[in-house]
Image: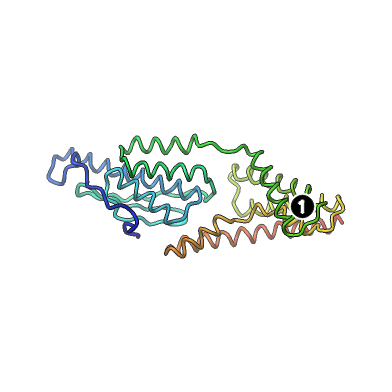
Amino acid sequence: MTADSGNMAGPLAVPSEYPEPGGTPAAAKLLYHDLEKIADTAIAFGRVLMECGASVRVIEQGALTVARGLGARPIGMRAGFASLTLTVSGGGHRVTRMRPVGRHLVNHRLDRAVRELVEDVAAHGGHWETVRARLDALVAETPRHAPLVVALGVGAACMAFGRLLGMDWLAVVPVFIGGAIGQYARHLLLHRGTNLFVMAAIVAFVAAGIGGLLSAVAGSASVRLASIAATLLLVPGVPATNAQTDIIDGFPTVGSARAVTVAMLMIFASVGIWCAEAVLGVLQ
């Protein structure tokens, strides 16, 4: 359980339309209902930020700031790898909400948009219903690049990293093709709900197999390096960075869980590469 962070603004006073205990039962019931909705809205911000790849400190600050901006007094928040728990109070009542978190992905554009909305709520407040609608609109309408564009960009990145690692020019186009096809396969598998680690093994096998096979056909002298370069799209850079940041910031539970996830991804990716190289060895 984490108390209000010291680098956040002080709690807002409970609005005057929210009576303290001793008011009418209807007013007290309305207050409790509002607190429930405020808690739901605030924790929804935290969930979206976590699923976009934010660190725990950003997640907690975002959720607590929204709760405060909507008129509640944040008591504390607990961030877990698979769930978030938030407690708020106001008018003599206290509400605790727990919500599950989906896959930890990376969506920088949505992450920035949600952070800007958090800043707007902190500065201007608002009603929970309006703020929740704005958040839902961001999640639904924030544009994304087309999967084919992403695949081509990833292929180009794998190709460039391969050259930096010393891969010869004959392997450049094969690595580009292998990386692009691997990224597109990852997109399809994730959208079909495939297990994250199984996905990593499959994508590594496909990308390494295509990159290595085409490099061998092209006469490259760096077939093995080409196989590895084509799978660099699977390197979990953001989760690895967040794992270190969370542990340093004092959130070892989530940080350790993220570190274990990173390790498992690399293990399964290595298995996929090993299988691809075994098949290439037989074909050669």
Counting from the top left corner in percent of width and height, residue 36 is at 30, 44
Q: Quadrant of the C terminus?
A: bottom right
Q: Which quadrant of the figure has residue 135?
A: top left
| Horizontal side, residue 121 vs residue 89: left or right | right
Q: Residue at x 15, y 46 (%)?
A: 21
Counting from the top left corner in percent of width and height, residue 29 is at 21, 41
Neighbour class for label 1 at 10 Å: few (<14), some, many (≥20)?
many
The outermost residue toward the left is 22
Query: SS class of the residue under badge 1?
Result: helix
Counting from the top left corner in percent of width and height, residue 102 is at 49, 48
| Horizontal side, residue 100 vs residue 24: left or right | right
| Horizontal side, residue 5 vs residue 221: left or right | left
Q: Quadrant of the N terminus?
A: bottom left
Q: Residue at x 64, y 46 (%)?
A: 186
Q: Which residue is mark 1?
A: 209
* Front one among 147 and 85: 147
- Which scheme is used to colour this image of the protein? rainbow
Q: Which quadrant of the figure has residue 118?
A: top left
| Horizontal side, residue 56 vs residue 214: left or right | left
Q: Amino acid at mark 1?
A: Gly
Q: Residue at x 35, y 35 (%)?
A: 130
- The vertical placement of 85 against 118, above or below, is below
Counting from the top left corner in percent of width and height, residue 228 is at 73, 57
* Front one among 7 and 85: 7
Q: How many marks?
A: 1
